[in-house]
């Protein structure tokens, strides 16, 4: 009955995500404050149900329930409890349920703790978060059910992939997914602000903690994963430029730029359009990373799935979310005021240069990662390895370091180039 209870919790959470979206739309479009007021509690209950589903899946692994297909394929009754526990997400279906659980908990946390935003903007934000969650609930329920039964039950499991039998499995995926989901919350804040035309310092102050949390967890997750690959796979150097490694680096680069931009908007009321666009780009990179890992188009030790149908499902979600956000951005960006102006030689100007250089590096990594895939679709087999990335991104990274060194010496809004040179010389 535990597996059925987990599946029921998942269905109920998906239904509540649909209800949350519908109530947000009605509350904003029709000005129904009574309906909008119910969005918060629905988001909280949805988060509880998502967490319950994940807890029940972990319970199935810990108890070695060999009537559940996922347990049979990824665990064994003789495994240490740590690998049973972490094995719950050391596979495609379980890792996606962990992804959705963190997404639901993040939405519940926003509903509970966010009090500074105007109510309409918060409701729009929770509606955007529900839209993201709804797509992934559908993905789990219709394409990647983690609670599928196996009849008859197997005598024992096949065991966990030997490469995943490491304490890093208990740390690396949860921290990385927390970073990804933190960017989804930033994306939802940006969409909510565009919907209500409330792009300003207040929205940025509400979004900034989520961007910081995402950046911290992405950094921890990437660092842990790199160390794990170093001693488990023998990869040399500090970065191997594996395609799925790059899939985690791209959202980190976008999150770094977004963190700078949202800080300027929150404290100096500048870079409004930059902040919105970077929030969209950062979440886009998270979605692209999810697609690369789960589509089967990459051959990598990181790849969880090789089912093209699942990849097509995620690709459709990516097109809907990112295409919709870009369309909303194009429609509403004209209503976003410029905010406080500044001279090119200023700290804000230095941050813009910083963001431009990070964006260039992001573009290089994105092209180098996707180009072999595009070429393969035309029958051309090629690989893009460390020599390309080192030569292309290296000079830009050095320029970025130079900007980072000079940036703190610049004054806000306006500065003199001669004075800056003097301060640098000292």
Image (cartoon, rainbow, N blue to C red):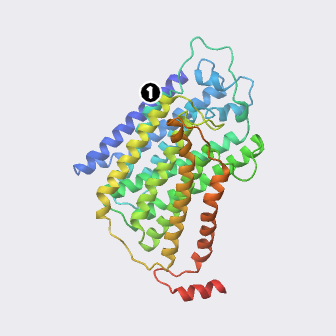
Label 1 neighbourhood size at 10 Å, few (<14), some (14-19), many (20+)? few
Residue positioned most to the top: 152
Q: Position of residue 238 (x, y in %)?
A: 72, 53
Image quarter in which the C terminus is found: bottom right
Residue 130 appears anywhere in the view: no
Q: In front: 95, or 77?
A: 95
In the image, is 266 to the left or to the right of 197?
right
In this view of the protein, which residue sits in the foreground, 309 or 85? 309
**Residue positioned 50% across, 44% down in the render:** 288
The secondary element bearing badge 1 is classed as: helix
The residue that label 1 is drawn on is 142
**Relative to the observer, which residue lies in front, 347 or 88?**
347
Above or below, comparing residue 236 to residue 146 in the picture: below
- Residue 135 lies, in percent from the top left, at 41, 37
Viewer-side residue, 235 vs 252: 235
Above or below for 292 versus 208? above
Based on the displayed image, in which of its 4 quarters is residue 302 positioned?
top right
Query: Could you tell me residue 150's position as x and y percent?
Result: 57, 16
Give me the residue at 43% from left, 42% from top. 318
Seen in the image, is 99 located left or right of residue 338? Answer: right
Which residue appears at 67% of the width and 44% of the height? Answer: 171
Using residue 332 as the reference point, say whether residue 272 is left or right of it: right
């Amino acid at each position: 009955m535990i597996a059925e209870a987990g599946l029921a919790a998942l269905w109920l959470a998906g239904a509540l995500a649909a209800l949350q979206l519908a109530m947000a739309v009605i509350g904003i479009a029709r000005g129904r404050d009574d309906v909008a007021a119910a969005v918060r509690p629905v988001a909280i209950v949805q988060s509880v149900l998502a967490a319950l589903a994940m807890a029940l899946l972990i319970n199935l692994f810990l108890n070695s329930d060999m009537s559940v297909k996922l347990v049979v394929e990824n665990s064994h009754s003789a495994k240490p409890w740590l690998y049973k526990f972490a094995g719950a997400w050391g596979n495609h279906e379980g890792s996606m349920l962990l992804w959705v659980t963190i997404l639901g908990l993040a939405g519940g946390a926003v509903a509970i703790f966010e009090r500074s935003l105007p109510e309409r903007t918060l409701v729009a934000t929770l509606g955007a978060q529900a839209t993201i969650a709804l797509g992934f609930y559908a993905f789990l329920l219709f394409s990647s059910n983690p609670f599928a039964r196996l009849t008859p039950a197997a005598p024992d499991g096949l065991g966990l992939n030997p490469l995943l039998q490491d304490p890093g499995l208990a740390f690396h995926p949860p921290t990385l997914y927390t970073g990804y989901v933190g960017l989804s919350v930033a994306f939802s804040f940006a969409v909510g602000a565009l919907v209500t035309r409330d792009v300003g310092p207040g929205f940025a102050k509400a979004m900034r903690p989520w961007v910081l949390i995402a950046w911290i967890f992405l950094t921890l997750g990437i660092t842990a994963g790199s160390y794990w690959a170093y001693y488990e796979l023998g990869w040399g150097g500090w970065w191997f430029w594996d395609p799925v490694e790059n899939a985690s680096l791209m959202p980190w680069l976008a999150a770094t730029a977004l963190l700078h931009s949202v800080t300027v908007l929150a404290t100096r009321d500048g870079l409004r359009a930059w902040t919105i666009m970077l929030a969209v780009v950062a979440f886009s990179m998270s979605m692209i990373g999810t697609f690369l890992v789960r589509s089967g188009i990459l051959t990598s030790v990181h790849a969880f799935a090789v089912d093209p149908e699942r990849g097509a499902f995620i690709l459709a979600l990516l097109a809907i979310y990112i295409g919709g956000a870009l369309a909303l951005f194009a429609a509403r960006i004209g209503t976003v005021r410029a905010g406080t102006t500044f001279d090119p030689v200023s700290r804000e100007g230095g941050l813009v240069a910083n963001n431009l250089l990070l964006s260039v590096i992001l573009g290089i990594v994105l092209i180098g990662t996707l180009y072999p895939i595009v070429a393969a679709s035309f029958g051309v087999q090629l690989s893009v390895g460390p020599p390309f990335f080192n030569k292309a991104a290296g000079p830009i990274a050095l320029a970025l370091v130079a900007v980072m060194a000079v940036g703190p010496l610049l004054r806000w809004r306006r500065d003199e180039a001669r004075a800056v040179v003097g301060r640098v010389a000292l």
